[in-house]
Image: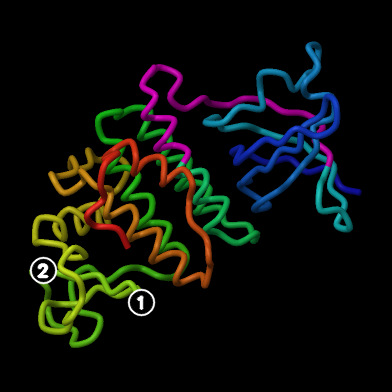
Amino acid sequence: MSILKTRALILKVIHFGDSSSVVHFYTEKHGKVAAIAKGARRLKSPFRGYLELFACLEIIYYYKPTRDIQTLSKIEKLQTFGADTTDWQFAIYGSVVLEALDKLTTHQPDKAVFQLAVATLNYMSQHPNLLRSALVKFLLQLAELSGYRIDLWSCAICHRAMEQSFFDEARALLLCTDCSHPLPKRLSLDNSELQFLRHLQNSDWETTLPAAPHFQENAFLEQMLVHYLTYQHDLNTHLKSLDILINMINPHTQEKQP
């Protein structure tokens, strides 16, 4: 048995037994880790108040390679994201980030992905008016770190420069106007939308991200990027938190929905 120490984000907390919890973490050094916090729901538990979403933690746990669920020993809160805002929208956008970490990444350690998630949640905390932009940038960078950078400049078939693009759901490709027939026009990206994506893809978290233009009324880009990631990873899943986001943005209709 080893004692391991690492920074971590909580992905989800599940009640276990009468008083304990099983906590799923995305850690900086060891990838995804599930650990039982014994007695965590008791009033005098040392874990009480720490097992909350949207916090960067330092955890110590006992590791046994033959176990799927490890044992949490100690926990310390390093930073809380969104602590200075009462905007409930932060919780929804932040939940999409955490669920994407849970469902759209492997179990292998990836320090860069952990740092991306921390940077995204931190940016959302500091710029509550740019939640949409931060989420789209997170998904773009997650695709790149996964080895599937999206070409936003040239058609995936003919390789000509694009002023307008269409998303091919079946192959998860961005195509030019000539190569897109007979794709539904609802899956189109105009030049302003492409420029927005290109700006986000090439920017860093130290700059002010561009505000999402009018097309963001229906969350098409978030849906497109999640669809792209699930296709590349050969996954048959969707994000429940994204469903909530879509309904929040437009509760009546989603015209662009991959």
Q: Residue furthest front?
A: 252
Q: Secondary structure at mark 2?
A: loop
* Callout 1 secondary element: loop
- Residue lying at the far top of the rendered structure: 44
Residue that label 1 marks: 170
Is 81 displayed left or right of 139 in the figure?
A: right
Kind of residue at badge 1: Ala
Crowding near pointer 2: few (<14 within 10 Å), some, many (20+)?
some
Name the foreground residue: 153 vs 221: 221
Q: Is residue 72 magenta?
A: yes
Q: Which mark is nearer the camera, 1 or 2? A: 1
Residues in magenta, as a range: 71-95
Residue 254: x, y in percent?
26, 50
Q: Name which quarter of the figure residue 71 lies in.
A: top right
Q: Quadrant of residue 122?
A: top left
Residue positioned most to the right: 1
Q: CA distance from mark 1 to mark 2?
A: 19 Å
Q: Which residue is mark 2?
A: 164
Does the magenta segment cover residue 143?
A: no
Foreground residue, 198 or 236? Answer: 236
Residue at the location (28% across, 74% down)? 168
Please provide percent x and percent y for residue 190: 10, 61
Q: How is the image coloured?
A: rainbow
| The residue positioned farthest toward the bottom in the image shown | 158
220 relative position to 213: left or right: right
Is 68 situated left or right of 245 in this image?
A: right
Instruction: Look at 16% across and 62% down and name the residue there.
Output: 189
Instruction: Name the amino acid type tagged 2.
Output: Gln
Locate residue 167, reporting x and y percent.
25, 70
Pick the quarter of the image with the C terminus: bottom left
Look at the picture and state if 52 lies above or below 228.
above
Mark 1 surroundings: few (<14), some (14-19) or many (≥20) residues within 10 A: few
